[in-house]
Amino acid sequence: MNRINQKLQENKKLLSIYFTAGYPALNDTVRIIQDLEKHGVDMIEIGLPFSDPLADGPTIQESSTAALQNGMHTELLFEQLKDIRKTVSIPLIVMGYFNPMLQYGVEAFCKKCHDIGIDGIIMPDLPLDVYQEEYEDIFKKNGLINVFLITPQTSKERIRQIDAASEGFIYMVSSASVTGSQSGFGNTQTDYFERIAAMQLKNQQIVGFGISNSETFEAATKTAKGAIIGSAFIKHLTKQGVDGIADFVQSIR
């Protein structure tokens, strides 16, 4: 069984952390992953930096630009992660944009992920129909779960289609805006969370965008299985460096 699905079976609310590979420093990637697991994070999204990250807010965009300037690229990330499964056991997901994956070669990219021990991929700009027509067999052959996103604007019909195509969890975007932390959730968002919960989808949901502290984590996971924190963690890394990871995780839980 894929590690993502094993983790989803645990009787707890899951904390997933996103960070940009190659940031703050080029060679921080492995240490960040190891420290996040050590301090109790359940899943990790490893951001593959891209020059035009349309779904990301300014914090993640800036970290992506800095990582590229540091020298991060796809092949280097794979090289950094080649021995990651010797020290890390929690699910690892590569999150990025389809262009770098396409340039690398989708089949070669997926095989590399499989060989390293990556469990899933999140590509916000890879449409469901294109994935199913052209790439689903490649993902499945390499044991990779493709995680799809839904937003408050996604129709019920589309959500059902995504639920049928999914094999892990659904990434539930909390709002229609780009990534970034916020102080709390309003009635519109809580109504959306409850509306999705009432659909009784076969796949559990993990909420992303706008989770920044224990309050928003608790609110997001009231009806969902877990929550993803990205921008707030990257801000913490920017200010405190990799030595402050324990403090950040403890502040959420």
Image (cartoon, grey):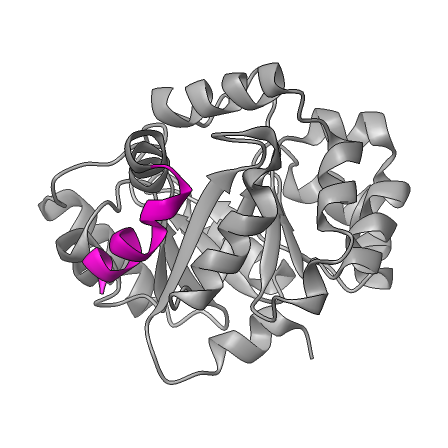
The reply, left or right, for residue 235 in relation to residue 93 is left
Q: Residue 127: where, in percent of width, then height?
A: 64, 37
The reply, left or right, for residue 174 in relation to residue 34 is left
Residues in magenta, as a range: 241-253
Q: Residue 165: where, in percent of width, then height?
A: 64, 59
Q: Residue 87: where, in percent of width, then height?
A: 64, 67
Q: In terms of image quadrants, where is residue 224?
A: bottom left
Q: Is residue 221 magenta?
A: no
Residue 109 position (above or below residue 125): below
Residue 73 visible in the current orientation: yes
Residue drawn at x 72%, y 24% as measured from the top left: 99
Placement of the N terminus among the 4 image quadrants:
bottom right
Placement of the C terminus among the 4 image quadrants:
bottom left
Residue 148 visible in the current orientation: no
Residue 234 position (above or below residue 55): below
Q: In terms of image quadrants, where is residue 250?
A: bottom left
Our reading of the magenta stretch's main secondary structure is helix
The reply, left or right, for residue 136 in relation to residue 107 is left
Q: Is residue 242 magenta?
A: yes
Residue 214 position (above or below residue 80): below
Q: Nearer the viewer, residue 237 or 215?
A: 237
Residue drawn at x 34%, y 30% as measured from the top left: 238
Q: Residue 92: where, in percent of width, then height?
A: 60, 58
Q: In terms of image quadrants, where is residue 212?
A: top left
Residue drawn at x 67%, y 61% as measured from the top left: 119
The furthest residue to the front:
243
Residue drawn at x 34%, y 35% as measured from the top left: 231
Q: Nearer the viewer, residue 31 or 112?
A: 31
Q: How many marks?
A: 0
Q: Nearer the viewer, residue 92 or 251?
A: 251
Q: Nearer the viewer, residue 202 or 167?
A: 167
